Structure formats: structure tokens, C-alpha cells
Image: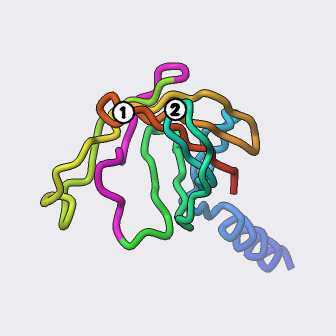
Amino acid sequence: MKPAFLLLLGLLTAIFSCRKDVAPASADPLYRRWQAIESRETGGSWQAVTTTGSLEFRPDGQIRYESYPTPPCCVPLRVERNEDRLRGTEYSNEGRCALINCALLREMRILQISDNSLILQHDYENRLMEVRYRAL
């Protein structure tokens, strides 16, 4: 009876100790998945965004783009955060991105953030655009 109990206990410990590749939980509302819903040139009128893709900011600075066949060009894959500023440090230069000459998204500024909503000001080499996101 005792060996069966120890075997069962060992099996349960092995099952419940397995960990999946999950990002660590963070109290910071930035670190989650977001979907763009509206955009505008700074000071202009909000326009609906038709893209269905989403992005996820991760605590290690990585940005994951979901529902895109490849990461979009001209946007950062990794950022460094300094309070409300996110500065791009790594960009995709593979495949079609290597052939595109575009204005890079150098910096994003958090204008407003809550658990459900995020507004970022995107700086495309001094052309400012604001994007409103909803949490997924």
C-alpha cells in the first residue's frame, strides 16, 4: 500500500510541476495583448482600424505580433522602456522587410493606459500618429 501511495504522490507531483512557456504575470497593464481599434494623426479625427492582428508587449521588451504571416516591417520587435516612452531597439530586416525603405517607428509614448485601453503616440521619424488599442 505504501509503495502505491508514494508512486501516486510522485506521479501527481510530476504532473503538476510541469510548466508551460508562459510570460510572468505583471501588475503593469502594458504587458498584455492589445488590438488596434482606431488611429489618427496627432490632433486629427479618429478613424477605425481594419487590421485584425494584435500585438503583445512583454516584460523583457519583446513585442510579439499575432495574426500576421510574418512580423510587420518598420515596427520594433523589441523596445526599451523608460517610464512612458518605448524606444525601438530591434527591427525585422528579413524577407520583404529588407527590400522596404520606410520610416521606422523609432519611439512610442504612452498617452493613456488602463486595464482595458491603451493610447500610444507613434513617432515615425517625426511624423506623429496616435493609436487606440483595446485589451484582449
Residue 7 picture quarter: bottom right
Left or right: residue 64 versus residue 120 is left
Q: At numbered mark 2, what does the secondary structure look like: helix, strand or loop?
A: loop
Left or right: residue 12 versus residue 131 is right
Q: Position of residue 15 (x, y in %)?
A: 68, 70
Amino acid type, residue under disc 2 in the picture: Thr
At 58% from the left and 53% from the top, the residue drawn is 36
Query: What residue is pinned by disc 2?
Result: 42
Q: Which of these two is toward me, 111 or 17?
A: 111
Q: At numbered mark 1, what does the secondary structure look like: helix, strand or loop?
A: strand
Query: What residue is pinned by disc 1?
Result: 127
Q: Which of these two is toward me, 27 or 12?
A: 27
State which tag comes first along the sequence, 2 or 1: 2
Left or right: residue 87 versus residue 25 is left
Q: Position of residue 121 (x, y in %)?
A: 51, 33
Q: Which mark is residue 91?
A: none
> Is residue 33 at all visible to an observer of this figure?
no
Would you place residue 101 above or below residue 41 in this image? below
At 74% from the left and 35% from the top, the residue drawn is 114
> Is residue 111 at all visible to an observer of this figure?
yes
Q: Position of residue 57 (x, y in %)?
A: 53, 45
Label 2 vs label 1: CA separation? 9 Å
Residue 2 picture quarter: bottom right
Number of other residues with Cα within 10 Å of mark 2, as a class: few under 14, some 14 to 19, many 20 or more: some
Q: Which residues are magenta?
A: 70-84
Q: Residue furthest front?
A: 44
